Image (cartoon, helix red, strand yellow):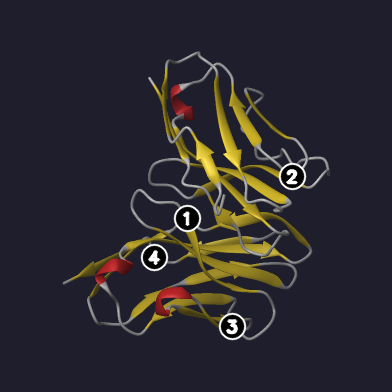
Amino acid sequence: GAGVSQSPSNKVTEKGKDVELRCDPISGHTALYWYRQRLGQGLEFLIYFQGNSAPDKSGLPSDRFSAERTGESVSTLTIQRTQQEDSAVYLCASSLWQGNGYTFGSGTRLTVV
Amino acid sequence: AQSVTQLDSHVSVSEGTPVLLRCNYSSSYSPSLFWYVQHPNKGLQLLLKYTSAATLVKGINGFEAEFKKSETSFHLTKPSAHMSDAAEYFCVVSDAGNNRKLIWGLGTSLAVNP
């Protein structure tokens, strides 16, 4: 597609359940970021993928969070045993190369009840 | 260590008047700097970027920003605000020596009054 696609756009889940968020980057974009944006706050870096290099996972807040990306294609962010503080908008962005400026998806709004 | 500070959390202007959104950064190396805009219930959009070329950068929708190394600033301006400019604006810095993590400001909410 022409842009970065994220699904689902909204997700409501019960506390303790696992959720999987999906990001389809722009074709050919080697760099992919996941961010979290809590209500009224700035963007919080989660994880970064660059081509086939080992991902930078330093932003993941706990071991309940994990992300995968196969090559330069789709990425999934998984949150296990969700907690209420996980409620946020999760944004994915991709770029042709790092530092070029990123195209963001519309995000997945996660609500943990 | 890199950091970015957006000096105003909220800015309110009247339609047709100038806009100034302030951003200061700190970086150990020559930084790349960006401004993003987020309209309500929409995704983030790149307004403009500075990557060590011309210090005055022109972006979309009439916005521009000037990189001032001596002041470590990258303020966003527009000569005349439009109602559609009401949104959240984010200043972002990435270190030329380590472009992997973009450091985001907390955002400035711009209100445009009729």
| Residues at marks 4 and 3, CA–CA distance in whole angstroms | 18 Å
Instruction: Give coordinates of residue A69: x percent, y percent.
Output: 72, 36
Res B68 label:
3
Residue bearing mark 1: B44
Residue underneath mark 2: A72
The reply to whether dot 4 and dot 3 touch (C-beta < 8 Å) is no
Percent coordinates x, y for residue A2 in the rendering: 55, 54
Q: CA distance from mark 2 to mark 4?
A: 38 Å
Q: Secondary structure at mark 3?
A: strand
Amino acid under disc 2: Glu
How much space separates mark 2 and mark 3, taking CA atoms? 36 Å
Which of the numbered marks, if any, corresponds to residue B8? 4
Q: Regarding mark 1 in the picture, which secondary structure is present there?
A: strand
Please state which of residues A105 and A67 is positioned toward the viewer in this rendering.
Answer: A105
Q: Residues within 10 Å of mark 4 (few under 14, many from 20)?
A: some
> Mark 2, chain letter?
A
Task: Tell me residue B3's x, y (percent).
Answer: 61, 60
